[in-house]
């Protein structure tokens, strides 16, 4: 066999350079947030910027545990978890109806499409009226308003994802279960849920992360009593100063649940896109 | 045990009529086959009996009581689905135990029942497996076990053998029959395969386009098909059908078929709606004798040319041509005849069925 002289592969080089640049682009801000969170606030403002803290300190994190930031995290946790639970539960019922009773008015392809339209408009187009609505009802600054709004905005997503999974469960399995003697709800629990568990896990993960990270709705509907952590961030200005180290600490802490979820639910989420 | 009465049942899906005024009485502890081509309405009929679908009109009665308001959970009906419908996330044991668990039976009893039914069906060694680890035949037996384990009064089978290979089909037919005789449930069994009906059924309901064409014992349906559909459908290979006409000359009746010539059929005593009618002549392949010499003892004998021999298993279906018409003959042995060679096609008039061409009904 003749030895083939290895030619320099321009295409490959270009692709890997691109991927490398993208990786830096994505990872650098995370590194910078981590870096800043261990600095003293004065250290943040040095020029030139310091790539490692000159005197590493946990002061930003200590502040986080004592201040109202803790409440914001708690509120975010409550709102994300309850809204996710509701959106997934309702989404499951709706996707079952879409899958099993297609062609009726409420479950037609048209209705299914209308659900998605909600997500295609810029949220701000809905949010101002929604803000006034809650204001009129006196429910601004409550968990309730936040949860209901998040459920409404995430229902299209949960229905959209779950419907594909319900579609894949053969109807005969449900019918076999009825003939075995199980009621509708028993059949859902014993047969449907285990068979769509992968889809359910992925839906819960995505939905929870979306709500957890959402800023605009949280900012508009939060107040003194209830505030989500993304809405809390802009309050961290002291006069002309922005407390970047504290913001960085919040960002790092807020990333942890998302990272954990993405790590543990990775295989289910990937399956959503590569079915 | 249970007797099923299907009373003037009609089912429409939108504008599409699936079952049209079906009436059947299924005897207690009998094996009844619903036989017909795909799309005839067999599955829909089973689903209505099970309560998974409700009829547009008409009634279903079990032992005289109307089932209209009884949900599937409470009908005492078990069903083997065409795709077997085994719960993929449960073990074989849990699949079979499922109906017993729904009935809140004690654990020891559940174990005992599952073990005894799985021994009966020879799947005792598979109880820990998941359905995807089983072969088609094993899956089917698990589905049957799930049906038998509750000792249901009525067991419905929706084409359970269709997806299996022919060796298992053959074996399972025998097992179904013995099983039913041993356990004595009322079985309604839907199938497109006439062999299923002929091997297993006490009675057969021939269904086509949502209409029951004939409902009687298998032997009766085979010997006296009510109409052309029943004659052609029940039997393998299918009945030969040839065009012809019946003409009256004095007191005598003659069949004039281009492929057969003119034959005196006075002795068949056909019921004629009018003195001269067009007919379809039906002769089963197994009633056609093929010979090198012209036989003397048979009523009709024609010269023909061998077109081909189709050997299936240990039998042969011979295709012959006589006066430009193809006729099939069933020979119960391997018969290799040279295409193009001459042979005689002979049959007895007693074995001939005559159908009115206009109505498809049997007239002799």
Image: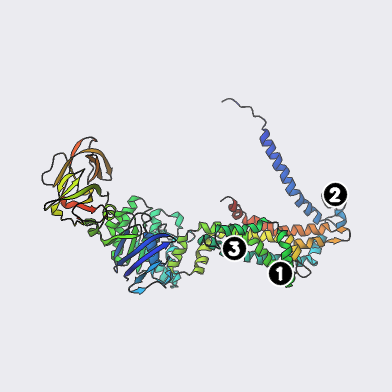
Residue at which label 3 appears: A91
Q: Quadrant of the N terminus of chain A?
A: top right
In the picture shown, does residue B5 fall above or below B322? below
Front label number (2 vs 1): 1
Disc 3, SS: helix
Quick one: label 3 or label 2, which is nearer the N terminus? 2
Q: Cβ–Cβ below 8 Å for labels 1 and 3?
A: no
- Residue B10 image point, x, y percent: 37, 64
Residue at which label 1 appears: A143
Letter of the chain that mark 3 sits on in the rendering: A
Disc 2, SS: loop
Name the residue at the top extreme.
A2
Q: Residues within 10 Å of mark 3 (few under 14, many from 20)?
A: many
Quick one: label 1 or label 3, which is nearer the N terminus? 3
Colour scheme employed for the rendering of this structure = rainbow
Q: Quadrant of residue B187?
A: bottom left
Q: Residues within 10 Å of mark 1 (few under 14, many from 20)?
A: many
Cα distance in 3D space between marks 1 and 3: 21 Å
Q: Quadrant of residue B300?
A: top left
Name the residue at the bottom extreme.
B65
- Residue B177 image point, x, y percent: 29, 60
Front residue of A28/B36: it is B36
- Residue visible at 68% across and 64% down in the picture: A150
Left or right, B260 with respect to B23, comes to left
Cα distance in 3D space between marks 2 and 1: 40 Å
Q: Residues within 10 Å of mark 2 (few under 14, many from 20)?
A: few
- Residue visible at 69% across and 61% down in the picture: A211
- Residue B46 image point, x, y percent: 37, 63
Letter of the chain that mark 2 sits on in the rendering: A
Residue at which label 2 appears: A49
């Amino acid at each position: 066999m003749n030895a083939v002289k290895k030619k320099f592969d321009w295409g490959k080089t270009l692709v890997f350079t691109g991927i490398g640049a993208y990786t830096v682009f994505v990872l650098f801000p995370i590194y910078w947030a981590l870096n800043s969170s261990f600095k003293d606030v004065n250290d943040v403002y040095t020029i030139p910027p310091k790539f490692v803290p000159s005197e590493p300190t946990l002061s930003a994190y200590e502040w986080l545990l004592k201040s109202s930031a803790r409440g914001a995290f708690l509120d975010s946790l409550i709102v994300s978890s309850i809204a996710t639970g509701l959106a997934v539960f309702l989404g499951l019922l709706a996707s079952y109806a879409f899958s099993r009773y297609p062609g009726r008015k409420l479950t037609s392809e048209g209705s299914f499409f209308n659900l998605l339209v909600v997500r295609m408009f810029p949220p701000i187009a809905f949010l101002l009226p929604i803000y006034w609505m809650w204001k009129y009802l006196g429910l601004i600054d409550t968990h309730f308003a936040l949860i209901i709004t998040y459920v409404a905005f995430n229902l299209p997503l949960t229905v959209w994802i779950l419907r594909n999974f319900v579609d894949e469960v053969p109807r005969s399995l449900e019918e076999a279960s009825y003939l075995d003697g199980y009621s509708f709800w028993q059949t859902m629990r014993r047969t449907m849920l285990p068979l769509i568990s992968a889809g359910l896990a992925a839906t819960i993960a995505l939905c929870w992360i979306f709500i957890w990270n959402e800023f605009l709705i949280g900012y508009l509907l939060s107040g003194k009593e209830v505030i989500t952590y993304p809405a809390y961030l802009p309050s961290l200005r002291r006069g002309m100063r922005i407390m970047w180290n504290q913001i960085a600490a919040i960002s790092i802490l807020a990333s942890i649940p998302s990272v954990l979820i993405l790590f543990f639910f990775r295989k289910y989420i990937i399956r959503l896109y590569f079915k | 045990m249970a007797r099923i009465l299907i009373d003037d049942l009609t089912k429409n899906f939108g504008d599409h009529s699936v079952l049209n005024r079906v009436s059947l009485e299924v005897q207690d502890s009998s094996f009844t086959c619903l036989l017909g081509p795909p799309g005839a309405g067999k599955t829909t009929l089973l689903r209505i009996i099970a309560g998974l679908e409700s009829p547009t009109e008409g009634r279903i009665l079990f032992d005289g009581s109307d089932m209209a308001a009884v949900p599937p959970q409470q009908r005492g009906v078990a069903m083997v689905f065409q795709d077997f419908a085994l719960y993929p996330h449960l073990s074989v044991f849990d699949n079979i135990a499922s109906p017993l668990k729904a009935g809140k039976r004690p654990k020891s009893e559940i174990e005992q029942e599952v073990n005894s039914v799985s021994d009966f069906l020879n799947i005792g060694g598979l109880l820990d497996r998941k359905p995807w680890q089983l072969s088609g035949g094993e899956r089917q037996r698990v589905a049957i076990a799930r049906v038998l384990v509750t000792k249901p009064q009525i067991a419905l089978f929706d084409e359970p053998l269709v997806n299996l290979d022919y060796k298992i089909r053959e074996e399972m037919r025998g097992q179904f029959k013995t099983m039913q005789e041993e356990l004595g449930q009322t079985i309604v069994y839907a199938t497109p395969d006439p062999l299923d009906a002929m091997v297993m059924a006490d009675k057969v309901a021939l269904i086509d386009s949502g209409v029951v064409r004939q409902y009687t014992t298998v032997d009766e349906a085979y010997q006296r098909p009510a109409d052309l559909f029943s004659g052609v459908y029940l039997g393998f290979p299918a009945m030969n059908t040839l065009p012809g006409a019946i003409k009256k000359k004095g007191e005598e009746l003659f069949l004039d078929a281009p492929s057969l010539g003119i034959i005196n059929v006075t002795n068949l005593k056909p019921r004629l709606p009018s003195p001269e009618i067009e007919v379809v002549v039906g002769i089963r392949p197994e009633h056609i004798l093929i010979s090198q010499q012209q036989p003397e003892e048979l009523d009709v004998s024609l010269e023909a040319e061998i077109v081909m021999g189709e050997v299936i298993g240990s039998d042969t279906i011979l295709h012959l041509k006589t006066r430009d018409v193809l006729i099939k003959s069933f020979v119960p042995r391997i018969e290799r005849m040279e295409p193009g060679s001459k042979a005689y096609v002979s049959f007895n008039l007693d074995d001939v069925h005559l159908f009115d061409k206009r109505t498809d009904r049997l007239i002799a």
